């Protein structure tokens, strides 16, 4: 066994490390062959981790997942975006004799990962519709000849005759089948794809191949679906913490949203980010607004031509544009590690979708920011698309979990984690409140909503709930109070009741905020599934007894603007950017290396982060290596990168 593994790795380095004998010497020629098998496995993995991928240590659960895959045990791994899922199949692929097949949902994701693997000396190919026939045949020949360790295909193409012919070729031995974004198999997932349902049948064609399913978002229900539909046999299940401590969580009610976005961008100058909108129209409007404000911005949605979408995405990935405004069609295939913020211009339809999208920020582990703007109209927009849908009930439950998060009065991080079944007790022991979320930050600053005499408004709201039959949610009741003539209100003849139009002194968002406060203070009870409001015993007693009711509200009588604008903290509690803490000499060096990285990437027609990401850049600037040996000690610098650009990079540093 030891001799076999030794020969596999030796063969790999001969093929992929540009015939550099240093690798062989540093790896195995000086290693004793007297280790037990497990020790050799661990030693081999650790050596590959550093010399090929440039990392000193595994991230949480990576080592355990890799061990299970190498032992041939089916495995389900739920790890947050940026948690290092790809390494869990890429490293084992180098230790296996045969082929690792990676089922990936988006073309951009395949291309990005193949580029990254080739940049570190690993032979990988993707086969999809973007390749012309001549290139397709050439890549196919590489796979059949045994030169390739990883083959990326889409779930749609997996069962086609072209891919089947390759996988069943007499020269091919499929050792591992990896399913990325495995939540797509489940109708309870946020991105269900029917083509994923066919993957389970492939498993029977390769009974000796180990199966690895990976996802960043999976509740218990989704995990069970993944195991059942993919036919995983007695799988090892690993669920990493969903906590992304480097991402600050913030939710704001919409109030002049274009100005809110502009204000946010002014506080994050030069940073790269994604802004998600609900509709194509909103994407185009926001893009035009930001372009007129001189921001370097691109748009992305299904209404654009393929060529325009492709160009805009490439400009964003290659740092020719800082901001991408997009619908949810954008992002799953983006592996860009230096995205510093994600803004939701509209509320997402589920917590799974929200978590997946904010996870595209801070993949490199550096400080990042997630801002969500929401209004109660967002709920109506989303529910409109539920009509005549067989999954209506299921989708509404997912939506109202998102609404609960947006309206939370407690730590957002705890609520987000508890949704995925994680219940940290002392989250602020490791993460300061001001770096956690907007709620914890405001508590740390001593900012609280003022107790406002709300007696008259409470009476009006409860009376309206009663006269509409306790059958509706806060949005509908608020519409009745402000005198809306919406079709639904007219159809129900609620424009004829005594409470119609008696609440015009408040705006709808203020009535909605009052409703939240009444629920929090147990004057109302809200149905968890559909948001219907009921009057509680405490609410009835407050009305009967003519009690004075004071509630914590952000608005007070006679003020047109929310009080929260006046209470906005003067200090920024965003986690300090690692580069902003450097001295001027280090900042200058970082700028020079960025320019060199951009030039080098343009020459190779690659995104700059493929050369190395900002985390590696920060480590280089901090350590200021002067020799190849010192450069090897920097994060993310493996042997292939040393060969590709080590000497040239040292010249930039030494200058």
Image: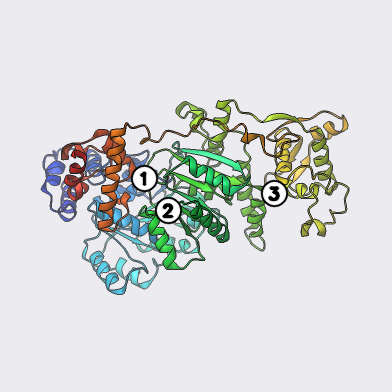
Horizontal and vertical percent position of residue 185 = 49, 57
What element does badge 2 sit on? loop
Instruction: Report, in whole angstroms, how far the alpha carbon at label 1 lies from the one at label 3.
Output: 37 Å
Crowdedness near tag 2: few (<14), some (14–19) or many (≥20) residues, C-alpha within 10 Å: many
Q: Which residue position holds label 3?
A: 530
Q: CA distance from mark 1 to mark 2?
A: 22 Å
Furthest residue toward bottom: 133
- In terms of image quadrants, where is residue 153? bottom left
Which mark sits nearer the N-terminus, 2 or 3? 2
Residue 354 image point, x, y percent: 53, 48
Of residues 199 and 250, the one drawn nearer to the viewer in this rendering: 250
Looking at the image, residue 306 lies above or below residue 420: below
The reply to whether dot 1 and dot 3 touch (C-beta < 8 Å) is: no
Q: Label 1: few (<14), some or many (≥20) within 10 Å?
A: some
Number of numbered discs overlaid on the protein picture: 3
- Reading the chain from its start, which is encountered first: label 1 or label 3? 1
606 left or right, relative to 344: left
Give the image location of residue 527, x and y in percent: 71, 44
Residue visible at 17% across and 43% down in the picture: 651
31 sits to left or right of 297: left
Position of the C terminus, as image quadrant, is top left
**Is there CB contact under 8 Å for labels 2 and 3?**
no
In-front residue for pair 546/508: 508
Checking the image for residue 404, the label placed there is none
**Which of marks 2 and 1 precedes in the sequence?**
1
* Residue occupied by mark 2: 232
Residue at left offset 30%, top offset 42%: 591
In the rendered view, tell whether residue 319 sits above or below residue 413.
below
């Amino acid at each position: 066994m030891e001799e076999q593994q030794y020969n596999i790795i030796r063969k790999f380095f001969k093929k992929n490390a540009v015939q550099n004998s240093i690798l062989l010497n540093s790896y195995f020629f000086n290693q004793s062959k007297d280790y037990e098998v497990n020790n050799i496995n661990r030693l081999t993995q650790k050596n590959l981790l550093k010399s090929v991928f440039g990392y000193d240590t595994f991230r949480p659960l990576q080592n355990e997942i890799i061990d299970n895959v190498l032992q041939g045990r089916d495995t389900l791994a739920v790890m947050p975006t940026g948690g290092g899922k790809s390494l869990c199949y890429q490293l084992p692929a180098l230790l296996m004799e045969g082929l690792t097949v990676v089922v990936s949902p988006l073309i951009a994701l395949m291309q990005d990962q193949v580029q990254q693997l080739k940049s570190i000396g690993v032979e990988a190919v993707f086969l999809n519709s973007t390749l012309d026939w001549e290139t397709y045949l050439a890549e196919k020949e590489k796979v059949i000849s045994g030169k390739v360790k990883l083959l990326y295909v889409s779930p749609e193409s997996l069962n086609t005759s072209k891919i089947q012919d390759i996988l069943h070729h007499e020269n091919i031995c499929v050792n591992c089948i990896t399913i990325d974004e495995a939540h797509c198999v489940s109708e309870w997932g946020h991105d269900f794809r029917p083509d994923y349902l066919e993957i389970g049948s492939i498993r029977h064609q390769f009974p000796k191949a180990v199966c690895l399913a990976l996802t960043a978002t999976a509740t218990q229900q989704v995990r069970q679906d993944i195991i059942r539909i993919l036919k995983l046999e007695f799988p090892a299940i690993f669920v990493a913490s969903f906590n992304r401590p480097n991402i600050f969580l913030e939710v704001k009610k919409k109030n002049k949203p274009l100005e809110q976005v502009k204000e946010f961008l002014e506080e994050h100058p030069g940073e790269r980010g994604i802004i998600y909108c609900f509709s194509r129209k909103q994407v185009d409007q926001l893009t035009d607004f930001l372009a007129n404000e001189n921001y370097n911005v691109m748009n992305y949605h299904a209404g654009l031509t393929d060529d325009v979408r492709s160009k805009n995405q490439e400009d964003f990935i290659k740092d020719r544009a800082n901001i991408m405004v997009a619908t949810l069609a954008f992002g799953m295939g983006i592996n860009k590690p230096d995205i510093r913020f994600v803004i939701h211009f509209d509320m997402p339809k589920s917590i799974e979708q929200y978590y997946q999208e904010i996870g595209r920020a801070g993949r490199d582990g550096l400080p990042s920011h997630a801002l969500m703007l929401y209004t109660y109209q967002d709920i109506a927009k989303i529910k409109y698309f539920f009509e005549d849908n067989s999954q209506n009930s299921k989708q509404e439950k997912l939506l109202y979990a998102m609404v609960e998060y947006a309206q939370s009065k407690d730590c957002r991080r705890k609520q987000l984690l508890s949704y995925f079944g994680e219940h940290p007790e002392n989250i602020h022991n490791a993460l300061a409140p001001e770096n956690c979320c907007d709620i914890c930050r405001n508590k740390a600053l001593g900012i609280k909503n003022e107790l406002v005499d709300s007696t008259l408004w409470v009476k009006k709201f409860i009376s309206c709930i009663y006269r509409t039959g306790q059958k509706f949610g806060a949005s509908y009741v608020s519409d009745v109070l402000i005198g809306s003539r919406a079709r639904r209100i007219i159809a129900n003849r609620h424009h004829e009741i005594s409470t119609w139009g008696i609440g015009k002194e408040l705006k709808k968002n203020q009535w909605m905020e009052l409703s939240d406060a009444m629920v929090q203070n147990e004057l109302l009870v809200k149905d968890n599934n559909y948001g219907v409001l009921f009057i509680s015993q405490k609410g009835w007693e407050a009305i009967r007894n003519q009690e004075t009711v004071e509630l914590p509200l952000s608005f007070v009588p006679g003020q047109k603007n929310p009080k929260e604008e006046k209470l906005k903290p003067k200090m920024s509690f965003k986690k300090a950017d690692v580069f902003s803490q450097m001295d001027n000499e280090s900042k200058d060096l970082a700028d020079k290396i960025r320019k060199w990285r951009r030039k080098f990437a343009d020459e190779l027609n690659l995104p700059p982060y493929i050369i190395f990401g900002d985390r590696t850049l920060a480590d280089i600037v901090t350590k200021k290596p002067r020799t190849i040996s010192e450069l090897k000690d920097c994060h993310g610098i493996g042997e292939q990168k040393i060969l590709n650009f080590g000497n040239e990079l040292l010249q930039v540093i030494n200058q």
